[in-house]
Image (spheres, helix red, strand yellow):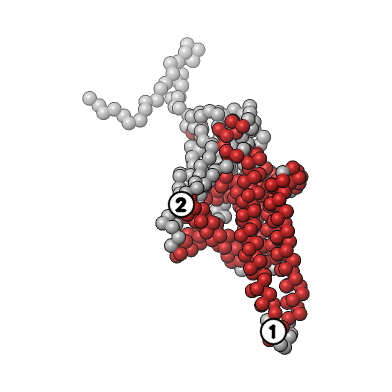
């Protein structure tokens, strides 16, 4: 008895009378359908430029800012307080740079020579520190109010009012301060690279500014740190363009002056970020959303078309920042799960293409990775259904066909 072959036997069709003795070639199941389909380089570049154009448009939605400030008293109060405080900080900084510093140069008396130092230590640095704390508080209240006006009060993830919740809030604030510090360090380090350093530092600042503008809405939606970073890095063209205006206006003065100017415009960009719609909805199938096909009549069975392999889906913008964050946290021994940030980031980086693309539309399991800074998960679809508002923050694939994916987009 012969052993069965491990390969399937080809099936031959029975010849018809008109075909005579001709026998057709074996009919194998076509494997071409299982191959991933790619957009061309020109199509992918055009889609990324479209995303960048949308980001630039969303960064100039001053009509939305004016309308919201004029219509809501709580938003108006927080914006005005932030405006007055940051104006005071900016005037104090330029008063030192343009008046005190030139007058103190060349003076013989000890007090006159050190007048600028006294001014910085006794007034300027405390003012900047207080401004940073108050700006964080007011911008958080502003973001919560703006998010509530859009999605309702139940949509905001409320931290637990327990001792553990207080510790988590303190850890979140500490980790956020460390991340701000490491972002500044990376920006200054990039500026010292020969030839390409200034351009790289400016591009990095664009992404950093966009991240902090969108951070509040991501926290309100329950995104962990790894998920926030992945969301930005997979939509790098949009967020680069969104952060371009704020980074451009913060490149002409001293470091403190640039920080004060950014804080001056920061509340307005938070409001713009709340009403923005980052593209593409699905970075692994960008033509569906950017190409105008993401409508109610879109067929969920359409084949996935990945971007061209010559243009990356994800750029690891925050890889050095996350590395420095966890390195500093490990040194300071803050918390017992300090490595969660880098672990989540490393796991999420596993979702990139390796030598091409996958046949299945998969994601790395980084959503479940816990980090020292994360929000509680909140489902916006059910909230939107209860309050009768359309949920524009997410899109759902309505059907799952063979070779397709059935996941929610980030």
Q: Earlier in the sequence, mark 2 or mark 1?
A: 1
Q: Position of residue 252 (x, y in %)?
A: 73, 65
Residue 401 in the image: above or below residue 83: above
Report the label total.
2
Q: Residue furthest front?
A: 162
Residue at the spot of label 2: 163
- In the image, 127 versus 253, the foreground residue is 127
Category of crowding for the residue at label 2, using alpha-carbon neighbours closer than 10 angstroms: few (below 14), some (14–19), many (at least 20):
few
Category of crowding for the residue at label 1, using alpha-carbon neighbours closer than 10 angstroms: few (below 14), some (14–19), many (at least 20):
few
Question: Residue 111 has which mark?
Answer: 1
Residue at horizontal 43%, vertical 62%?
333
Image position of 209 (left or right of 60)? left
Q: Position of residue 28 (x, y in %)?
A: 44, 27
Label 2, label 1: how far apart the Cα atoms are = 49 Å
Residue 356 in the image: above or below residue 101: above
Quarter of the rendering occupied by the N terminus: top left
Q: Position of residue 251 (x, y in %)?
A: 70, 63
**Mark 2 or mark 1, whichever is nearer to me:** 2
Q: Is residue 409 visible?
A: yes
Q: Secondary structure at mark 1?
A: helix
Q: Residue furthest bottom?
A: 108
Residue at horizontal 44%, vertical 18%?
13
Q: Is residue 305 visible?
A: no
Residue 90 in the image: above or below residue 45: below
Quarter of the rendering occupied by the C terminus: top right
Q: Secondary structure at mark 2?
A: helix
| Residues at marks 2 and 1 touching, judged by CB atoms closer than 8 Å | no
């Amino acid at each position: 008895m012969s052993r069965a072959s491990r390969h399937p036997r080809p099936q031959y069709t029975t010849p018809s009378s008109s075909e005579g003795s001709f026998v057709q070639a074996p009919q194998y199941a076509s494997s071409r359908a299982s191959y991933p389909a790619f957009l061309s380089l020109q199509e992918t570049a055009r889609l990324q430029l479209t995303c960048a154009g949308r980001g630039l448009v969303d960064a100039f939605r001053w009509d939305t800012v004016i309308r919201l400030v004029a219509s809501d008293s709580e938003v108006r109060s927080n914006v005005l307080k932030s405006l007055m405080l940051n104006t005071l900080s900016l005037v104090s900084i330029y008063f030192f740079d343009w008046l005190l510093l030139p007058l103190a140069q060349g003076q013989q008396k000890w007090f006159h020579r050190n007048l600028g130092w006294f001014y910085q230590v006794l007034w300027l640095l405390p003012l900047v520190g207080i401004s940073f704390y108050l700006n964080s508080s007011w911008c958080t209240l502003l973001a919560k109010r703006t998010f509530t006006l859009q999605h309702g009060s139940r949509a905001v993830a409320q931290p637990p009012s327990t001792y553990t919740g207080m510790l988590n809030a303190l850890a979140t604030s500490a980790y956020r301060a460390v991340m701000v510090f490491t972002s500044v360090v990376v920006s200054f380090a990039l500026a010292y690279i020969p030839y390409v350093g200034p351009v790289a530092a400016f591009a990095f600042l664009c992404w950093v500014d966009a991240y902090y503008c969108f951070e509040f809405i991501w926290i309100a939606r329950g995104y962990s740190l790894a998920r926030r970073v992945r969301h930005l890095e997979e939509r790098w063209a949009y967020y680069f363009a969104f952060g371009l205006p704020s980074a451009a206006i913060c490149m002409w003065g001293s470091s403190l002056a640039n920080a004060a100017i950014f804080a001056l415009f920061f509340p307005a960009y938070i409001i713009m970020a709340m009403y923005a719609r980052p593209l593409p909805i699905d970075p692994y199938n960008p033509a569906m959303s950017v190409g105008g096909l993401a409508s109610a009549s879109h067929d969920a069975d359409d084949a996935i078309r990945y971007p061209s392999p010559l243009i990356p889906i994800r750029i690891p913008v925050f890889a050095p920042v996350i590395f420095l964050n966890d390195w500093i946290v490990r040194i300071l021994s803050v918390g017992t799960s300090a490595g969660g940030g880098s672990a989540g980031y490393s796991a999420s980086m596993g979702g990139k293409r390796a030598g091409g693309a996958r046949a299945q539309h998969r994601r790395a399991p980084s959503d479940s990775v816990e980090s020292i800074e994360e929000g509680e998960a909140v489902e916006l679809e059910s909230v939107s259904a209860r309050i009768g508002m359309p949920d524009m923050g997410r899109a759902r694939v309505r059907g799952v066909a063979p070779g397709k994916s059935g996941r929610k987009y980030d």
